[in-house]
């Protein structure tokens, strides 16, 4: 194809993003339709196959206030403990993990997959099968945080999501709208809190002279 096969471009602000409509000549459009993929229920990518910005950015109901609170040490501990459940990653170095951390208990469930969305889907199923309420702990991810992961964590009912890598701007916005605590860029005892810091308490430190 070439740029000459484009007959027009319409760009429209769509609130959460930009809607770009590209019109093609008939022959080019026929080729595009012939190669177009129709995806049914993809899970490897949270947004693949979605053609509406509004659907991709669908509103998430605020998570219930369950009284869940973590201290600063819980954040680093959750990531450290999740690493112990990454047996497949230890062998391949090529998969993500999602875990569920409960203060005072540790990681009660963890799942791995080459796709971060899949790993979280597996975790959601494991929690449901075990009868573990999402509001009792934090979702812990080894990946970056995209808006789809916020949507899935909110569906689980967890008010806290912890990740080792950075969140996207849309993820931060949606976590804030859902009333979730978003913690990312965890490196040992250091981390950044992007939304709802009130669920993270400082540890009392005793100094002996």
Image: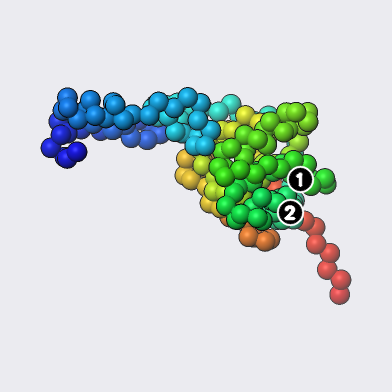
* Element assignment for label 2: loop
Report the residue marked by disc 2: 84
Viewer-nearest residue: 60 or 86: 86
| Colour scheme shown | rainbow
Give residue 168's position: percent from left, percent from top.
Answer: 48, 45
In the displayed structure image, the side of residue 38 where residue 64 appears, left or right:
right
Can you tell which quarter of the image residue 149 is in?
top right
Q: Is residue 136 visible?
A: yes
Q: Is residue 94 above or below residue 20?
A: below
At label 2, counting other C-alpha atoms closer than 10 Å, the crowd grade (few under 14, some 14-19, many 20 or more) is few
Report the residue marked by disc 1: 107
Give residue 16's position: percent from left, percent from top.
Answer: 40, 34
Which residue lies at the image location 83% right of the left edge and 46% below the top edge? 104
Which residue lies at the image location 51% right of the left edge and 42% below the top edge? 146
Which residue lies at the image location 33% right of the left edge and 35% below the top edge? 18
Q: Residue furthest right?
A: 208
- Are discs 2 and 1 less than 8 Å apart at CB? yes
Mark 2 or mark 1: which is in front?
A: 2
At label 1, counting other C-alpha atoms closer than 10 Å, the crowd grade (few under 14, some 14-19, many 20 or more) is many
Give residue 118's position: percent from left, percent from top.
Answer: 59, 37
C-alpha gap between disc 2 and disc 1:
10 Å
Viewer-nearest residue: 201 or 167: 167
* Element assignment for label 1: strand
């Amino acid at each position: 194809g070439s740029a000459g096969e484009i007959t027009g471009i319409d760009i429209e602000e769509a609130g959460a993003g930009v809607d770009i409509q590209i019109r093609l000549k008939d022959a080019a459009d026929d080729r595009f339709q012939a190669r177009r993929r129709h995806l049914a229920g993809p899970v490897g990518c949270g947004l693949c196959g979605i053609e509406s910005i509004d659907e991709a950015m669908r509103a998430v109901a605020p998570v219930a206030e369950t009284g869940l609170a973590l201290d600063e040490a819980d954040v680093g501990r959750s990531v450290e403990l999740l690493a112990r459940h990454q047996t497949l990653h230890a062998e391949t170095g090529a998969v993500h993990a999602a875990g569920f951390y409960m203060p005072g208990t540790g990681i009660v469930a963890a799942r791995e997959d080459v796709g971060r969305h899949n790993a979280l889907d597996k975790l959601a199923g494991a929690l449901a099968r075990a009868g573990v309420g999402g509001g009792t702990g934090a979702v812990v991810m080894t990946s970056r945080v995209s808006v789809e992961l916020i949507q899935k964590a909110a569906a689980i009912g967890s008010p806290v999501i912890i990740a080792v890598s950075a969140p996207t701007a849309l993820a931060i916005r949606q976590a804030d709208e859902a009333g979730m605590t978003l913690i990312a860029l965890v490196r040992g005892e250091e981390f950044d809190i992007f939304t709802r810091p009130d669920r993270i308490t400082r540890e009392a430190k005793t100094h002996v002279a």
